Image (spheres, coloured by chain):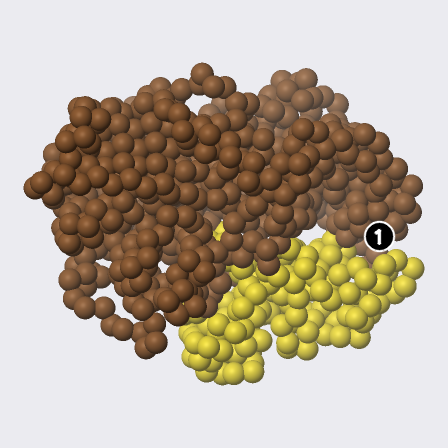
Chain colours: A yellow, B brown
Amino acid sequence: MARYRFTVNGQPREVEAADPDMPLLWVLRDRLGLTGTKFGCGMGACGACTVLMAGEAVRSCQTPVSAAAGRRFTTIEGLSPDGGHPCQKAWLAEDVAQCGYCQPGMILEAAALLARTARPTDADIDRAFDGHVCRCGTYARVRRAVRRAGALGGAR
Amino acid sequence: MSATRRDFLRYGALAGAAGAALRLPLLAETAAGVSPFAPNQWLRIGADGRVTLVVARSEMGQGVRTSLAMILAEELEADWSSISIEQASPSPDYPDMNTGGSDSVISSWPVLRKAAASAREMLVAAAERRWGSPAGECRAERGFVVHAPTGRRLGFGALAADAAKLPVPKDPPLKDPKDFRIVGTRVPRIDGPAIVSGRAKYGLDTRVPDMLFAAIARCPVAGGKLVRFDAAKAKKVPGVRGVVAISNGIAVLADDTWAALEGRDALDVVWDEGRNAALSTEDLWRRLDEAAARPGRVSRKSGDVEAALAGATARFSATYRDTFQAHASVEPGSTIARVSSGRCEIWTPTQNPERVRREAAKLLGIAPENVRVHVTLIGGGFGRRLGADYAVEAVEVARAAGRAVQVVWSRPDEFRHDFLHPAGRADIAAGVDASGRIVAWTHRFTTFHLTMFGAFDPNAVDDPDVNPWGGYDNPYAIDNLRVEWTDVESPVATGAWRSVFYPPNVFARESLIDEIAHHLGEDPLALRRRHLEGKFPFATREVDRAELRAVLDLAAEKSGWSSPLAKVPGRRSGRGIACNVYHGRTLIAQVAEVSVGDAGDVRVHRVVTATDCGQVVNPLGLEGQVESGVAWALSYALKGEITIARGRVAETSYREFPVLALAEMPEVEVYAVASDRLNRPSGFGEMPVPAVAPAVANAIFAATGKRVRKLPIRPEDLRA
């Protein structure tokens, strides 16, 4: 059984996995107990499993554990110690969540977007969230929260 | 250190230390601090002043935990920040936990107000005793009881133990709505911080000690049976711990979800696909079309429709169709079950825990009292989680496994074994007299029965029969009216889907009204207004049409209905209006602004919603429900459909069944009539859905002159 080392939320982690293709999603959820990263589709079509890899938004369901080795990841649990990341604050201020299930992925996507572009245009936001499904339809509030988070200082 | 199986077990042990031994105790038992004051099953007040509300409904994004807490805090005169939520489990104390039909706030309103008012009166009485003050000098205010003459104050926590010794008043006075300071204000979701930090636990996130994960191979064709299977390859998948056959398939048990899914894929299974093996969408439509040719059950009738139609100066008839739809909640199904020594414990994202309990007890042959159901957060319900299938199946797996098991559904499982919104057709005929009055209207709706609620029974008729929703409760004053409906036995699984049968029927009704208006050369709003005098029935209630007129007027005013619509360069633009009354309670009118490109692509730019929904508990929540309902309805009107091929649901991903994307979300505006019509809330989860599709279809007609009679709307039908 191969061992894989990577960093999650600033902590070095090591996992054993028999299958090098085991998606990071399931490593996070079932091995490391980090259930804030959500399973939605398993094929990169809904965005619920989005995490940050060296600051970039990636789909953890499409990231094999073998490809995760040596990388740095941030999950929703590690975005801030106290829920005080500008995106989290903006999400609360805009009361974005309904069922809330897709929101960790959305928040991490927003953090990655704002790291690239401090003041995203509507088209930037449309593009960044293409492939994120919210069946509750919180999209208008997501857009407002991204703008608010940008004004709050965005990416940190 | 390395995170291996050992860590997994340690994680389980930690969960055990937090209170999960063989049987997780009631949340009540683990609540921090002692709660000396629990005057009823709905609330407790601790010595620290914390108020705990027990919520006997399921939270699935509709904000029920927040709105019920607001009702309680209001009547209790509690400080909002002192409120905590605890989820109820089915028991004699909570006999109705079913969460559907937009009923939670309506039915909880009187119950929670009375429960909170009792507690408030007891706290006031306790303070009066403490101070020896005469009755009437003390009042509750934001978590304190205040002695008005002296300004002395005591917190609820300090009074809780004394209050507990007093008799519970039977008929406590309720607050005058004009004194409300929480109800009617914009309160963010009480569970928002847990959601944005990833702490919120949904069904899939729940963990219990020593549990395995499982995935189930089920026959892809409804009604099929297992012939044989070979688990040799599955058992070789690392992490797979066992394979068990259950009544509807084969479960692969594993140490993690990935191994369970991989193990399931490695099974060799032979199914007997049964009599539906060749079933197609075309077959299903043939069944509907055959049934639609025959009269249905008559649920509403007045005057002589045939004579009025014969005597009409202009006659209209049209058939409107919608299609099979999936729920496509982002959280796939899951349930944890554990069965041991004649008891069962279940953790499940359900809208109907009593049903889960009942069906699990029946499966196991034990008393329902020996089944404990923990309701988790639901990552999108929309009616799908009124079914108990996914929970009872997990109980069967857990029984076979002899330990706790979490059954996980993949995305294809979720599509393929959904209880679909069934396709339906509405056939409407109408007649207009020389004065332009609609004098005759027949509405026949034909669809499939909902298998989620039991086997097909051709003789089953609701009493009172208010079907079809949206046809029966046609709001317009038409002297000669007949409403019929037929449900056909469904060979595919069908069920409740946000607002159920309203969408196809309101689409049909509001489209034909629009068609008549255009034929008469009349403003569709004006035509509606002319036919909204007097009252119309819903079951034993009556709705005053003038109230719907007022809501239409508000939608028209706020949308700028009578002003020209700004043009979108290179596109054809139009505005459409539609309205509906949901179960005789909540009144809605919606105006959509759309533009259509030369390729027939539809963009919805703005949807204005006006409503009379009685007392608005949380305007922020109301707006969220409207945004959500509009998004849901636009997916229905413009996006995916489910088809059946070779007996299977053909679409098994969001790529094949697309739903509305962020870039497609229109501006949504919400306006509520300031109304004392009901003096209470009238519900709002499903209400914003039905009128959206016809408002969009009518706007498309205004833009293109093309009449939409089938949903979802396809670009090829709208090319320039």
- Is residue A24 among the parts visible in the rendering? yes
Residue that numbered label 1 is attached to: B6
Q: Do we see residue B43 in this rendering?
A: no
Along the viewing direction, whichever of B322 and B630 lies nearer the viewer: B322
Question: Is A139 on the left-hand or right-hand side of B253?
Answer: left
- In percent of width and height, residue B206 lies at 65, 46
Q: Chain of mark 1?
A: B
- The 10 Å Cα crowd at callout 1, few under 14, some 14 to 19, many 20 or more, is few
Q: Position of residue B662 (x, y in %)?
A: 47, 65
Q: Nearer the viewer, residue A63 or B707?
A: B707
Q: Is residue B624 left or right of residue B254?
A: left
Find residue B172 and report its horizontal and vertical position in percent. Answer: 26, 30
Vertical placement of residue B534 versus B93, above or below: below
| Quarter of the image where one finds residue B289 | top left
Most foreground residue, B695 or B335: B695
Q: Position of residue B433 (x, y in %)?
A: 12, 38
The residue type indicated by label 1 comes to Arg
At x 74%, y 63%, the residue is A24
Farthest left residue in view: B435
Quadrant for the C terminus of chain A, please: bottom right
Q: Residue at x 88, y 51 (%)?
A: B238
Q: Is residue A33 left or right of residue B305?
A: right
Residue at x 12% of width, y 34% of height = B534
The image quadrant where one finds the N terminus of chain A is: bottom right
Vertical placement of residue B703 versus B625, above or below: below
**Which of the two residues, B229 or B599, is positioned nearer the viewer here?**
B599
Q: Quadrant of residue B120?
A: top left
Going 7% across and 41% down the picture, which residue do you hit? B435
Residue A9 left/right relative to B490: right
Q: Secondary structure at mark 1?
A: helix
